[in-house]
Amino acid sequence: MEEKRIIAAADEVRRRIERELTRTVQERLVAPALNVRAAQAGLPAGCPELRMRLSRIADGLGDTVDELGAILRGIHPAILTDCGLGPALKMSARHCELPVDPNVTV
């Protein structure tokens, strides 16, 4: 019984970390990306180089937000809670760069 309580407490800590990082870090990256896009939209037509630089900055921030989201979902994937270890491992295997074929017996 103690083991289940420890596992549940650890799961809750991972969920809390995921929520806090999503609420703080991810939101702090989204705001500058929106500001860069707004600055880009307000540029006069004669600034193609600056427009391209701002676009690369906004795209980079967007990519960082996407990567952070993937990392955060990996801290405690919902599929682990909803479906169990086997499906969670199979989903993780699909995202590996090398081919992985998990054979899970639970």
Image: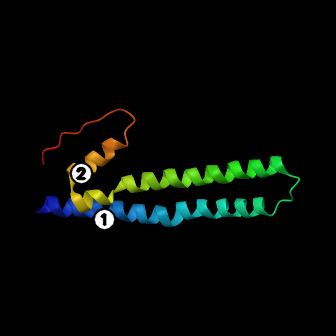
Q: State the residue at coordinates (45%, 65%).
A: 20
Disc number at residue 87? 2
Amino acid type shown at disc 1:
Glu
Q: State the residue at coordinates (78%, 52%).
A: 51
Amino acid type shown at disc 2:
Pro
Q: Is mark 2 on a helix, strand or loop?
A: helix
Picture layout, residue 71 above or below residue 100: below
Left or right of residue 29: residue 91: left
**Which of the pair 21/43 is nearer the observer?**
43
Q: Where is residue 12 in the image (x, y as percent from the top left)?
A: 30, 65
Residue lying at the far right in this picture: please name it. Answer: 46
Which residue was labeled with disc 1? 12
Residue lying at the far top in this picture: please name it. Answer: 98
User: Comparing marks 2 and 1, which lies closer to the viewer?
Assistant: 2
User: Which quadrant holds residue 8?
Assistant: bottom left
Distance from the alpha carbon under mark 2 to that under mark 1: 20 Å
Is tag 2's residue or tag 1's residue first in the polypeptide sequence?
Answer: 1
Left or right of residue 1: residue 76: right
The quadrant of the picture occupied by the N terminus is bottom left
Left or right of residue 24: residue 98: left
Disc number at residue 74? none
Q: How crowded is mark 1: few (under 14 residues within 10 Å), some or many (20 or more)?
A: few
Q: State the residue at coordinates (27%, 51%).
A: 88
**Which of the pair 85/17 is nearer the observer?**
85
Q: Position of residue 50 (x, y in %)?
A: 81, 50
